[in-house]
Amino acid sequence: MAAEIQIANLVKAYANGTKALKGVNLEIEKGQCFALLGPNGAGKSTMVGILTTLVETDAGSFSIAGIQPQKDAASLQKVIGVASQENELDPVETAENLLVFQGRLFGMDKALARKRASELIHTFRLSDEREKKAECLSGGNKRRLHCALALMHRPRVLFLDEPTVGMDPHARAKFWEVITQLNREQGVTVFLTTQYLEEAEKHASSMALLINGQIKYAGSISCFKNLVNPAGSLSLDESYLAFADSMKADLSIS
Ligand code: ADP
Ligand code: MG
């Protein structure tokens, strides 16, 4: 059976000449919680942008749930949800209204959109913010709202680009409870980027390491740790740094 996300030879250069992706191949099986790791500027958000049809590629192809964007972009957009790093929220709309509009955009009637919005407000503990304008939300609450927006239409593949930046420890724990439940109980495939490697280690089932637009490792987290340190006592964080040293690449996180 085909992988849930299949990526073949993706290449992307921006207009200013920056080569963000230099031929990326990856396969992610259905039901995985997959973490794309790598330093700032590695090309992670570019990849999320391409896979969610927000950024155009120069070469290569991909499919998600068997759907190719060039053949059926509308169907593809229905099966994916995305909380991207640069999501703009309409500053003067309330959190609740933004959720309801999102539901309407995906074809829900008003009553259904309101019901689903209420569920997600409850799930992401946004009850105190529901009437607040987006511009008045704290950074962490904005990230929670981004995630709730991404889930309004019950996507089967969820993209989360550095989702927990700015969340306090309680919000982060609750966030992972929600995502883990979606992943394990509802089989939602999660494609995550994060700089919090302990988070990836705890919650992801597979990973890839993207450096300077190229995949340097793809597979399970335990195999990565084993590859770096066969004696086997390093955390993912320590393994990542050791791998960087061994490559003599600059992986400093600015
Ligand atoms: P990451 O998410 O891993 O930090 P990005 O995908 O955001 O990396 O960026 C990859 C590279 O592409 C970086 O060198 C970045 O400066 C560049 N880049 C990203 N977006 C643009 C853009 N819109 N125009 C020009 N260069 C960009
Ligand atoms: Mg990024």
Image (cartoon, rainbow, N blue to C red):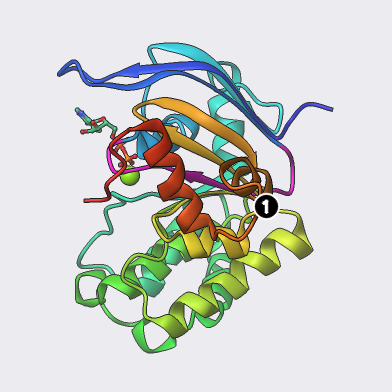
Q: Please indicate, yes or no, whether residue 94 appears anywhere in the rendered image.
A: no
Find out whether residue 39 is within the magenta segment: yes
Residue appearing at x 42%, y 36% in the figure: 246
Q: Nearer the viewer, residue 41 or 66?
A: 41
The local secondary structure at tag 1 comes to loop
**Occupied quadrant, residue 202:** bottom right
Quarter of the image where the N terminus is located: top right
Q: Residue furthest right?
A: 1
Q: Amino acid at mark 1?
A: Ser
Q: Position of residue 9 (x, y in %)?
A: 52, 14
Q: Nearer the viewer, residue 126 or 39?
A: 39
Q: Which residue is mark 1?
A: 205
Residue appearing at x 31%, y 51% in the figure: 87
Ligand 2 lies in which image quarter?
A: top left
Residue appearing at x 42%, y 70% in the figure: 144
Q: Is residue 16 left or right of residue 150?
A: left
Q: Which residues are magenta?
A: 29-41
Q: Position of residue 52 (x, y in %)?
A: 47, 36
Q: Main secondary structure of the magenta part?
A: loop
Q: Is residue 161 above or below residue 246?
A: below
Q: Is residue 152 above or below residue 54?
A: below
Q: Position of residue 15 (x, y in %)?
A: 19, 17
Q: Position of residue 206 (x, y in %)?
A: 64, 46
Q: Nearer the viewer, residue 140 or 105?
A: 140
Q: Residue furthest left?
A: 16
Q: Residue furthest front?
A: 231
**Occupied quadrant, residue 178:** bottom right
